[in-house]
Image: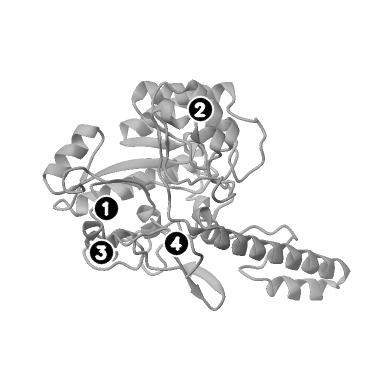
Amino acid sequence: MLRTTPLVDGHNDLPWRIREDTLHSNDLEAYSLTVRAPGMTDLPRMKQGMVGAQFWSVYEPGEPDASTYKRNGKVTGTPGYARVQLEQIELAKRMIAKYPRDLVLATTEADVRKAFREGRIGSLLGMEGGHAIENSLEALRAYYDLGARYMTLTHNVTLDWADAALDSAVHHGLTPFGREVVREMNRMGMLVDLAHVSPAVMSNALDVSEAPVIFSHSASRELVNHPRNVPDSILRRVPKNGGVVMVPFVVSFVNRAVKAYEDSLAAEEKVLKARTCRLEATASAPRRNALRRRRPHRARTSCRWRRSRRHRKRSRWHHHHYRRTRGRFEVSDAAGRAGEARLDRSGPS
């Protein structure tokens, strides 16, 4: 079947993986896709997995204090969402152009089918997070003109017009402007991606959208009670809309044992944070500084810890597999591209 019908992968974070590479950041020449790459995606594995079309995510963090948004000179803005979004779109396009025998930029269904007949992978661009439009429909239209063909309404941070699944529910759905965003995406022909948003936003978007929506990487909340997953009340509405839920290989989204393990780690971290804060409250200034230097990940000047950007984004370098190592679940070099991806419901290996 996959020889006659293109298999569309809805979300691949390779452009961000290249940007954040510890040895050759943003270096497309050094990060080759013709051999087995250090991340989870390369051309040999895509061919072996029989990928017919690929949405490359042009992700950028939604957190305004992320180091990605440090000022780039005196005249640059903060946080700089638009600048980084443009950089990621340009990086993805250069990556696609580097491998013309295997990849080709696609902006329509016809482009995808033509590439498939030619034995190439039609490459589309997907924006991950409405923060990139900075509350501007004009910016949304500009990103469409640059090739973006879906936008995830939020990432992990609640916006001025939509609530995120992993953040506080401020609006309890879409604001009037958020509904206008959905209508404008419909008008242009840009897919509305409801991965990452709250259930109320999912419901409101289904109310408003006149075109099929997608969930580019979310699973069933009934199977695994993760806030990033889709409740049954929403799943029941998807067929009538004509949309699709594209199940990810983020193991904590699809495996209850892994989800329970990660919850236990989060609980332990919360306890350690409380203990450290109590110690700091009663310690002398030199002792407080010493305690801060001993904190995991990075020293901070207050008791409010944030998970590192790498941790927030962990396992999102394409499809997501874990392996058990020294009692921790860590990202493995995914089998998904080799067509070996299977949902292990018996628990972690």
- Ranked by sequence position, the earlier of labels 1 and 2 is 1
- Residue 321: image location, x then y, percent: 43, 63
Residue type at mark 2 is Ala
303 relative position to 230: left or right: right
Res. 336 visible in picture: yes
Which mark lies nearer to you, 3 or 4? 4
Q: Residues within 10 Å of mark 2 (few under 14, many from 20)?
A: many
What residue is rendered at 61% in x and 59% in y?
307
**Residue 344's mark?**
4
282 relative position to 338: left or right: right
How far apart are labels 2 and 4 at the CA level?
32 Å
- Ranked by sequence position, the earlier of labels 3 and 2 is 3
Which mark lies nearer to you, 1 or 2? 2
What residue is rendered at 56% in x and 45% in y?
222
Residue on which disc 3 sits = 32
Q: Is residue 141 above or below residue 263?
A: above
Residue on which disc 2 sits = 205
